[in-house]
Amino acid sequence: MSDRDKPRIESISAVTLFVADMARAVSFYEALGFDPLYGGSEASFTSFRFGDNYLNLTLGDRSPSAPLWGRIILHVSDVDGLHRRALDAGLEPQFAPRDAAWGERYFHLTDPDGHELSFARPLPRRE
C-alpha cells in the first residue's frame, strides 16, 4: 500500500472541553458568535456548530489536583474583526492580532475555564 493509499486524518470534526460552569461558558462562546446546536446554559453538555465542525462543552469537576485545560486553533475569516468583537463583548484577549513566522495572523483568548483559544488566518503567500 503506497502512502497515497493509506488512510489519513483530514480535519477536526469536534473538540470537547470540560467546563466548571456551563452557563458562564455558554455565555462566553455565544459572545464570540458560536450558536448552540444542542444543550445550553442549564445543560450538562452543550454542542456548538461552526462550519462543518463542532465545539462541545461538558460539565466537569474542577479541582486543584485535576486542572482543566485545552487549546483549540480555529481558522477564521477575519482575525482582526473577531478580535474587535471579543473586545466589544468585554472579553480580554491575551494580545492584539499579530503575524507569526509560521505564516498565520492570530491572537489568543482564554475562556472562563482556562482553555486557550487561538484564532488564526493563513497569511497570503509571498512569492
Image (cartoon, grey):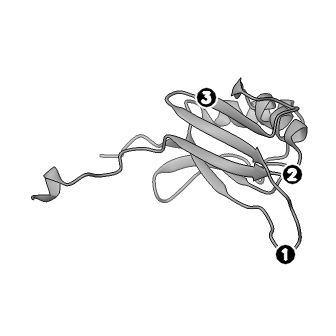
Q: Quadrant of residue 120?
A: top right
Q: Is residue 120 visible?
A: no
Q: Residue at x 66, y 35 (%)?
A: 80
**Which residue is disc 1 drawn over?**
65
Is 66 above or below relative to 109? Answer: below
Most extreme residue toward the front is: 44
Residue type, mark 3 in image: Arg
Residue beneath disc 2? 20
Residue 24 drawn above or below residue 115: above
Q: Which quadrant of the view contains residue 124?
A: top left
Characterize the local packing of mark 2: few (<14), some (14-19) or many (20 or more) Cα atoms within 10 angstroms. Answer: some
Checking the image for residue 87, the label placed there is none
Q: Secondary structure at mark 3?
A: strand
Looking at this view, name the residue that lies furthest to the left. Answer: 1
Which residue is rendered at x = 73% and y = 47% of the image? 96
State how far apart marks 1 and 2 are (Cα): 14 Å
Nearer to me, 42 or 70: 42
Q: Is residue 15 above or below residue 70?
A: above
Picture residue at 51% right of the left edge, 49% below the top: 104
Of marks 3 and 1, which one's residue comes earlier in the chain? 3
Q: Which residue is mark 3?
A: 49
Q: Earlier in the sequence, mark 1 or mark 2?
A: 2
Counting the numbered discs, the total is 3
| Whole-number angstrom distance, CA of label 3 to CA of label 1 | 32 Å
Position above or below: 63 against 25: below
Residue 89 falls left or right of residue 96:
right
Where the N terminus falls, by quadrant? bottom left
Q: From the top left corner, tell me how far across and down residue 108 is, in percent.
A: 70, 51
- The three-letter code of the residue at mark 2 reads Ala
* Disc 1 packing (10 Å; few <14; some 14–19; many ≥20): few
Amino acid type, callout 1:
Ser
